[in-house]
Image (cartoon, helix red, strand yellow):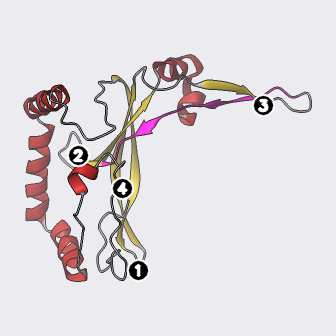
Amino acid sequence: KRGNMSGFNPYADKKPKQVEEDDPDFKFLKDKTLNVSRNEMKGLARAMESKEFREIMSEYMRDISDPKNKDELEQYLTQCEENGELPPNTKLIRPTAGFCLKTTSNKLINRKEKKYFEQKTFINVTAHDIMELPKKIDKSTKGKKGFTFELPYRVSKGRPDQDAKGEICTTFDVIFHPEVIKMTIMYRSEFLKFV
């Protein structure tokens, strides 16, 4: 992810990438390009430093995090699914909650000066049986026993969110087969680190 990039325009001297028809976002992005000038990027960087702007963003984050609004979103998505209005090759699923990991990620502020800021990041680990089963693979060699795992998964794009204190953070959702959640309980901390 590029994050906040003061003074850097990733689209300068490049043609905008065309969205392919099989891309799930094709319906929404067809014939649209993102042309951000260096001044606009600087303006965004300055805005992120403004207390007033951060307060407005926090209010927005509270609104979209409100359970009432989440219920409205769920109703909207269900309606889209029933009316066949989801993007092509998209299936709406409702995974089971597993656990949440709290970490941090470095967000780029200025590529030229290689400046970053650290942002709190949450990873919601969920499960649904639409995912492939995990595989335990024997890796024994020269008389030594060993094994590894293949854990098929899908990860959402990072989305702006808010922590319990109202601070802006990033949240990702990752989905595994339910057996992976069971394995984290069975194998405890070592397997949890692997996940």
Among the 4 quarters of the image, the one containing residue 117? bottom left
Viewer-proximal residue among 51 and 16? 16
Cα separation between marks 3 and 4: 39 Å
Sequence-first tag of 1 and 4: 4
Task: Sort mark 2 into few (<14), some (14-19) or many (20+) by Cα contacts within 10 Å.
Answer: many
The kind of secondary structure the magenta stretch mainly shows is: loop
In the displayed image of the protein, which residue is found farthest to the front?
21
Identity, as a three-letter code, of the amino acid under mark 4: Glu
The residue that mark 3 highlights is: 139
Quarter of the figure that contains the N terminus? bottom left
Q: In this figure, which residue is indicated by the disc labeled 4? A: 20
Q: What kind of element bears circle 2? A: strand
Residue 123: x percent and y percent? 38, 39
What distance separates the C-alpha of mark 2 from that of mark 1? Answer: 27 Å
Nearest the viewer among 104 and 21 is 21
Q: Which residue is mark 1?
A: 113
- What is the C-alpha distance between the residues marked 4 and 2? 29 Å
Segment colored magenta: 144-158
Relative to 95, say whether 88 is above or below: below
- For residue 186: magenta? no
Image location (x, y in percent) of residue 24? 32, 45
Q: Pick whichever of labels 2 and 1 is earlier in the sequence.
A: 1
Q: Which residue is denoted by mark 2 in the rendering?
A: 161
Q: Residue at x 27, y 48 (%)?
A: 159
